[in-house]
């Protein structure tokens, strides 16, 4: 069941009152929720509320709280993803999957082989943040990732404690081999960099080499960029938390 985001100001006397126009419209008009139905809410303190609708008015409704608890639906990693921006559907899929997998932030990158113009990317950030927010609701995640402004590889590599690049060229070392030699502190920030469908340019590979940024392989198969993102995030999460 998807949950809906509220603020503690919506809560009083063990009840949740919703009078925000858009939230009221979505739950009552679109979902056609009725008195007696259960609704999940999440506040800014990551407290989950299990509620039952008690009263519906023309422009608001009230729910009784039947249970509340600290949500655990997030990963214990400061994990960030930077990916060369993809064409529309693939970019949306990447944001959804990154959100579902628990990243703290999504950085749209402009690379040499980027498929989308810089001017277009800059106008999409707000839309992508909304997509991330909708994904948070669907997967019941309790923290909201930030979709950052457009950036470039050279501007982000010094902002994180650990940085790894997943690429199909110039490496045969997988992530599990890498962390045996270079343990990653799970309490520190981790940045994963993923390239465009056409791969990184030779200039960008030279930049990685010059700055000692490790290149990691996902194996013998060549993935679409949005699939590579999912595979890379899953690999890093499993490797750092359970490897």
Image (cartoon, rainbow, N blue to C red):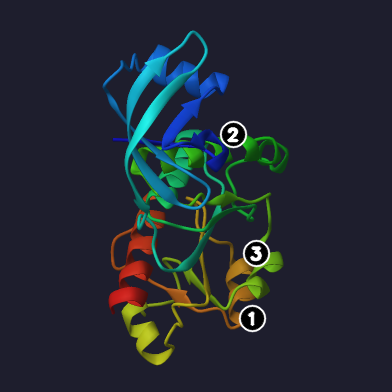
- Residue 38: image x %, image y %? 28, 29
What residue sits right under mark 1 in the picture? 211
Residue occupying image coordinates x 47% and y 75%: 215
Tell me what residue is drawn at x 69 percent, y 35 percent. 123
Residue 124 falls left or right of residue 22: right
- Nearer to us: label 1 or label 2: 2
Residue hosting label 3: 153
Task: Give the total number of marks visible in the rendering.
Answer: 3
- Identify the secondary structure beneath mark 3: helix
Toward the viewer: 45 or 215? 45
> Along the horizontal axis of the image, is 207 left or right of 35?
right
> Which image quarter: residue 20?
top right
Q: Nearer the viewer, residue 232 or 34?
A: 34
Q: Relative to residue 18, is residue 236 depicted above or below?
A: below
Circle 1 — which element? loop
Is mark 1 in CB contact (under 8 Å) with mark 3?
A: no
Asked if one can make out residue 174 in the rendered structure from this viewpoint, the answer is no
Q: Pointer 2: what residue? A: 127
| Mark positioned earlier in the residue sequence (1 or 2) | 2
Please state which of the two labelled residues, at mark 3 or mark 2, is closer to the viewer.
Answer: 2
Residue drawn at x 35%, y 58% as measured from the top left:
72
Disc 3 residue crowd, few under 14, some 14–19, many 20+, Cα 10 Å: some
């Amino acid at each position: 069941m998807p949950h809906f985001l509220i603020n503690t100001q919506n809560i009083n006397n063990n009840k949740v009152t919703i009078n925000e126009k858009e939230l009221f419209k979505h739950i009552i008009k679109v979902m056609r929720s009725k008195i007696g139905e259960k609704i999940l809410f999440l506040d800014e303190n990551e407290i989950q509320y299990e509620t039952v609708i008690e009263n519906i008015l023309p422009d608001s409704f009230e729910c009784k709280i039947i249970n509340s608890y600290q949500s655990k639906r997030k990963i214990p990693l400061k994990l960030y993803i930077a990916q060369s921006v993809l064409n529309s559907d693939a970019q949306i899929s990447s944001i959804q999957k990154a959100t579902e997998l628990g990243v703290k932030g999504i950085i749209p990158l402009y690379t040499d082989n980027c498929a989308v113009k810089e001017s277009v990317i800059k106008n999409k950030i707000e839309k992508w943040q909304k997509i991330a927010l909708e994904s948070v609701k669907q997967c019941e995640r309790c923290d909201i990732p930030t979709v950052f402004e457009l950036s470039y590889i050279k501007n982000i590599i010094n902002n994180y404690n650990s940085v790894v690049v997943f690429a199909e060229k110039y490496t045969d070392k997988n992530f599990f081999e890498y962390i045996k030699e270079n343990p990653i502190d799970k309490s520190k920030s981790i940045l994963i960099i993923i390239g465009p469908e056409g791969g990184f340019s030779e200039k960008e590979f030279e930049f990685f080499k010059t700055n000692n940024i490790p290149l990691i392989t996902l194996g013998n198969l060549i993935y679409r960029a949005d699939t590579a993102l999912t595979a890379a995030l899953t690999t890093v999460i499993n490797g750092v938390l359970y490897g």
